[in-house]
Image (tube, helix red, strand yellow):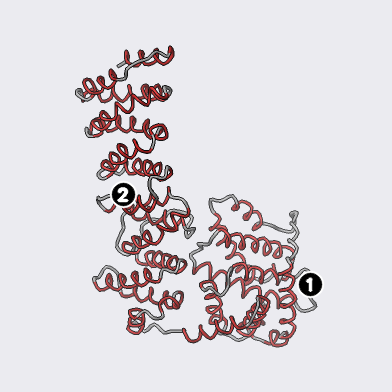
Amino acid sequence: MQASLSFLEISRNKNYPFNGKFIVSLFGKLILQQPSTSRITENFLKEFIPLVGKMKRKGLNMLKMLYSSLVAMSQEEVFEASSVLLLQLYLKNLDMFGSTWVQNYLLQFTKSKAQGNTSWIEYYCRVGKFLVDAGVFTWWTFFAYNGLDAALNFQLAFDSLIIDFCDIDSFELLRKPLYSVAADLLLKSQDNSFYQFLSNLLKRGHIIATDLIPASNEKELLKLVSMFSKALQKYSYQDLLSTLLALAKNHCEDGDISRDFLAKYLEFLNKNCLTELRNNQLFITLRREFGVSSDEDEKCRFWNSFNESGDILSKVAFVEAGVIQACCVAGEFDGYLDKLSTLFNSVMLENPFTFFSDLVIAHIFEDRPPFDMNIRNFLLYQFITLLNKVLRMKFEQVSPDEFSELCKLHRALCIECVTDDTFSKNKELVNEKAAFSSSLLRIADGFWEHSRLSQLDTLNKSMNVPCQIPHTSVQNSLSVIVIKIIEDNIEHIKASEPFIQFKST
């Protein structure tokens, strides 16, 4: 073996012609017929591989001749590590082999190995990616017609890598069948391979930022199923939402999940996915069976009024007036909060977080108005409560654009808390703002924004407090509307019991 390496090195350095058949003979007669040399073979390959990598065309021809030896080595367990070492050399030179040779030889070879060895699934997908990039087939073709006919955990590992490797446009095409796989398994699988697949799927769609772990109890499972249902709603997969509900019913009847779980899941769907399931007969039947009440008519009236209110400025006036009316009556605001929260799940606002972030910032007036700032704080408290409720509903999973809006709002609130004594002295407002900040910091965990957000959260008057960012033209217009509506309702607010209690905290 050492003599062969020396000969190859001399031939390469002197640019001598050579016939690689003697290497093939070495593999066939010495290595493959002497299993006891497996460790020696592995060490030999560690020197052989970088040497061949420097030989360009001559090395390529040698590797083509060695292909049968690679296949033979892979079939012997004792040579598993050595065959993987040699395979890596092929994978690094796919461009040199060309798509025709790779498709005819490496594709089927790596697929056959991947059927029984999970570590080979990645090698198979790397070959597939090369052929997709070369235009031999598409990711859809690779997924639909070149999948693994193997155990479920092998198929899920294959699907996970497809999610990682494919481009954005291909993922758009593959997303629904992948979500269909997830929906079928969500309520029954505790396998790590499924949770890795689900994590990759949800991370690719910016539904989550970190890997999931298997649910250890029904409370955790309900949280996961609810989050997944929100993703189905986001992509308008009503049929998969219906499938998931039917599966939940079947699993409940089989005793795999409790009736309490199904009841709570129905309540979640009734509150968050009513539009998608309003005509689903199973949903209607189960809701009646479990006594889950419907707010459909009331929500529809609210949505109709919101839509009919007009442009964005008119919608802001509608929301502001509604908040004032609701929060001034004890026990009324929670119901109105539920209605407002449905706007984050509907198509009535193109960017709900932008709408409400701008509305909250519009309450941080550039020029202090003549009325008691505790009134402003009272309303700020209601809107921050709304955003905290929505973040809980969304399990703190937001898109990059939504996260950006929340960061903008966080900055404004942190600076206002330090610079306005009426804000910082109200315990309820400070606590609600702290809850908002904590949620945002959890969302930002692991990203570069976390450090900056943390610094803002620890501001105090002894520091060099940054100035508020000037209002945009939209925020200025909203401030004018907010001040006008507050002034029109100021006596009603001041006399209300909820405001009196808030001011005293």
User: Where is residue 238, by image quadrant?
Assistant: bottom left
Does residue 149 lie above or below 370 as drawn? above
Residue at 75% across, 78% down: 372
> Left or right: where does residue 224 sit relative to residue 495?
left
Does residue 86 lie above or below 450 as drawn? above
Residue at 30% across, 44% down: 118
Q: Amino acid at mark 1?
A: Arg
Mark 1 and mark 2: span between their CA atoms? 66 Å
> Left or right: where does residue 297 sit relative to residue 159?
right
Residue at 33% across, 60% down: 181
**Could you say whether the residue bearing mark 1 is in a helix, strand or loop?**
loop
Q: Amino acid at mark 2?
A: Asn
Q: Residues within 10 Å of mark 2 (few under 14, many from 20)?
A: some
Estimate the x, y position of residue 221 in percent, counting from the top left: 37, 65
Q: Nearer the viewer, residue 57 or 486?
A: 57
Estimate the x, y position of residue 499 in percent, counting from the top left: 66, 81
How many marks the image carries: the answer is 2
Estimate the x, y position of residue 184 in percent, counting from the top left: 31, 63
Q: Which residue is mark 2?
A: 146
Tell me which numbered mark, 1 or 2, is placed earlier along the sequence: 2
Q: Which residue is mark 1?
A: 368
User: Where is residue 232, by image quadrant?
Assistant: bottom left
